[in-house]
Image (tube, rainbow, N blue to C red):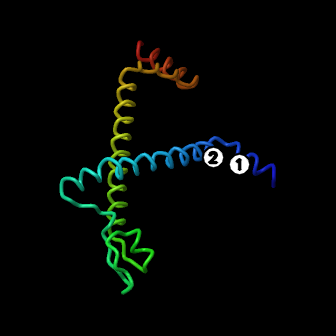
Amino acid sequence: MLKEFQEFISKGNVMDLAVGVIIGAAFGKIVDSLVNDIIMPFIGALGGVDFSNYFFALSSNVHSTNLVDARKEGAVFAYGNFITVALNFIILAFIIFLMVKAVNNMRKRLEKEKPAAPAAPPPADVALLTEIRDLLARR
């Protein structure tokens, strides 16, 4: 069983998956920073909107106006966080779309620049039959 596990781990697909997960986690942090530190402040400045503090108090003990303190006082329905996460997802999906589109365009460009591979020679029996056909056609 240990040998099978070693074979499984040493396959390239597992390593590719591990690299993808690590890169994805790092990319997620970049997108979070992009949204929270760059995009959301502009949205807040333009419309006076700060989604992070949008919530409904579910407890009569909640009297705070900011989410952090309100959560300490009782249960809250923090729909502003959901809006922020949804916006993060939309931005992430759009960035991934742009990246995939760029990679596909680059692949197409490289395929156009690459010379066409010569055709593989036909199998021996097909070549022999072609020669016989050509000999008979000349008679």
Residue 103, picture quadrant? top left
Q: Reading the chain from its start, which is encountered first: label 2 or label 1?
A: 1
Is 106 above or below relative to 94? above
Residue 80, picture quadrant? bottom left
At horizontal 18% and vertical 58% (from top left) the residue drawn is 47
Q: Which circle marks residue 14 in the picture?
A: 2
Residue 52, picture quadrant? bottom left
Q: Nearer the viewer, residue 51 or 89?
A: 51
**Looking at the picture, which amino acid does disc 1 mark?**
Phe
Q: CA distance from mark 2 to mark 1?
A: 7 Å
- Position in image of residue 112 (x %, y %): 35, 24
Structural crowding at the residue carrying mark 1, measured as other residues with C-alpha within 10 Å and reported as few (<14), some (14–19) or many (≥20): few
Is 10 above or below relative to 54? above
At horizontal 46% and vertical 21% (from top left) the residue drawn is 117
Question: Dot 1: what SS?
Answer: helix
- Position in image of residue 98 (x %, y %): 33, 41
- Position in image of residue 114 (x %, y %): 41, 20
Looking at the image, which residue sits at the far right? 2
Instruction: Name the image quarter holding the C terminus.
Output: top left
Left or right: 8, with 81 as reference point? right
Is 37 above or below relative to 115? below
Q: Nearer the viewer, residue 109 or 42?
A: 42
Q: Nearer the viewer, residue 19 or 83?
A: 83
Left or right: 42, with 23 as reference point? left
Q: Nearer the viewer, residue 83 or 109?
A: 83
> Does the residue at mark 2 contact the one at mark 1 (Cβ under 8 Å)?
yes
Question: Dot 2: what SS?
Answer: helix
Q: Which residue is mark 1?
A: 8
At horizontal 50% and vertical 17% (from top left) the residue drawn is 131
Instruction: Name the image quarter holding the N terminus.
Output: bottom right
**Looking at the picture, which amino acid does disc 2 mark?**
Val
